[in-house]
Image: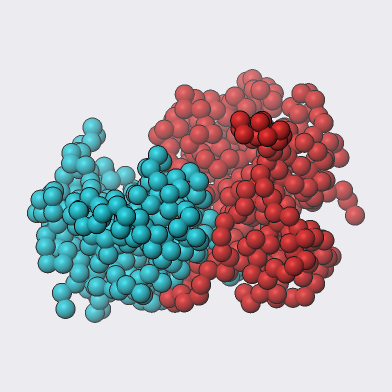
Amino acid sequence: MTEPLLKVENLVVEFPGRRRLVDWLGGRPRPVARVIDGVDLTIDRHETLGLVGESGSGKTTLGRAILRLVRPSAGRVLFEGRDIARADAEGLRGLRRRLQMVFQNPHSSLNPRFTVSAAIAEVLRFHRIVPEGDIGAETARLLSLVGLGSEMAGRYPRSLSGGQRQRVGLARALAVRPSMLVLDEPVAALDVSIQAQVLNLLNDLRGELGLTMLFIAHEMSVVRHMSRRIAVMYLGRIVETGTTDEIFGNARHPYTQGLLGAVPRLEPVKRRRQAMLQGDVPSPYAIPAGCRFHTRCPRAEDICRRVAPPRVRVSATHEAECHFAGSPSVVPA
Amino acid sequence: MAPLLAIEDLVVEFRTRGGRIVALNHVFLTVQAGETLGIVGESGSGKSVLCRTILRLLPTPPAEIKGGRVMFDGEDLLDAPEARLRQLRGTALAMISQNPATALNPVWPIGDQITEGLRVHGRIGRREARKRAVELLRRVGIPSPELRVDEYPHQWSGGMVQRAVIAMALAGGPKLILADEPTTALDVTIQDQILALLLDLQAASGMALVLVSHDMAVVAETSDRVAVMYAGRIVELADTRTIFREPRHPYTVGLMQSIPRIEGGAGRLRPIPGQPPSLADLGPGCPFQPRCAVASPDCATTPVAPVEIAPGHWSACLHPERVGALL
């Protein structure tokens, strides 16, 4: 068994909230949001792991913590065996040559005053990827790699479509020749017909370049299409992981089941069902006691309100944090 | 029976620095009482402009209504005076917009906003209005509404605010609700709740619903009929089953094939090549022709208009018989 490329151990990220006057008078401490609350995760080399969850689940923060764009409060992030959480500036620079992030919003992640080629050349220069004289040729190679013609090189972001901008973002990430990409909702801002183009491109590049990917998205169908293995996140914890077939065919966590049940189907059949999951995701400032999902869970029992569920092993590749994960189909899907 | 809403040959242009663009190009539609009509299309297809034109909320200029009629319950909204429009918007005609966060005034209690229309039109007093607000919030599934009616939008989650916006739309007892991407800003579990709520309310009250969405699956699950928009035109219109089982416009097929299925399978996605067109430089022919797999040379030059190819099934394609081969 080879070492996984990325290993996250008991990661915790906290954001301090505002201490109000009443807190201060009442002697209460500054409130703290536990956005990541003890996450364990591994990704093997050349694997794509899909990470799904609703807004507020912590999936974006987890992606950012892996690149140390936010500093974890506790835990370890081992990339190629080295702890990112404790890396110094030199170590981080080396790390970001191996591990890159692609952001959701291609409008805000590109500098509006840089042409496409200047945006890519900047990365090549900063990380000294190729000698100065080769930057032009390398930029052209990267553009063609992401399916952009050379006529795009002199254009500014404002004259590009969303899909083209996302390709430029991808070219920038690939410029350092990383072994792994963290993709945070890479197609969420794109029109439907353009999403498919970018998803196909990502699939092709993964094969050609042997990339490892953490693919973060809220859309179950997109994650299913892109991933071999899936992790489902709820309120700062990974509540279920399994192969794509296990998650879609045999989900054991009621949250995963509810998430799957909520996705509208592309079938012309008028819905009669009621929504499976009621209510909203609770605040990370006040995570419910016991099982954090019990406030929305259709089958919560007394134990769920008192005791945090263990991680139940369903198969060698399938785990769920639910008291009842051992018994299949707790809720009709 | 006459339809509740009938849009005939509607043309809307925008004046921009780059010249005139045609945002709505001879759009036609009908909505029957009690019916749900889904409108799908990508950004720039004109679906939001259409909703705003119906409600006469489009700023003119830069927009200009060049022609057509919008008949609502026997009355042409394009001819109606502003006072009449204002009255209609608070009563028979209501809109739910995409972004619940901007739909409410942040410094005003939610309950007051929900019944503002009723009070402005002088139909009820303050105490009665508060009672109505509580009732409406209960109808849209807000727990303990009598305790929450005086709260402010920032105290509520996005899903709850969208419920409040729906309550506001219901306040005047509408015959038609225009819902412009009502669930796009929401998480999928909250979308599920809101769609269930809208369909329940519709079944209970018999109102008609126009549901605008970029998501084919949302429309598939909710609509009786579907209109597909592209580049400011209706390119296909039929009952929901026909749109999904026997589409006769290549763009409709492209939209369905480019989406990954929740059921899995399919392998490689089949995207629509190229980009949506810029409305500023459309040729004389079919706007979809540069991206179309079954286009012939005449598609670029021959103007197309929707044709009724089967009863109730309209397609704006010169070669609808070729579309079956794409499926």
Q: The chain shown in cyan is which?
A: B
Q: In which quarter of the image is the C terminus of chain A?
A: bottom right
**How is this picture coloured?**
by chain
Residue A171, percent from left and from top: 58, 37
Q: Which residue is drawn at 10% across and 54% down?
A: B80
Q: Which is nearer the eye, B94 or A192?
A: B94
Q: Quadrant of the N terminus of chain A?
A: bottom right
The answer to whether one can see residue A139 in this image is yes
Q: Is residue A252 above or below residue A105?
A: below
Colour of chain A, in one word, is: red
Residue B104, percent from left and from top: 38, 46
Residue B143 falls left or right of residue B298: right
Residue B2, percent from left and from top: 15, 74
Instruction: Return the residue found at the far front.
Output: B127
Q: Residue at x 20, y 53 (%)?
A: B121
Q: Residue at x 51, y 72 (%)?
A: A274
Q: Which residue is drawn at 59% across and 60% down?
A: A220
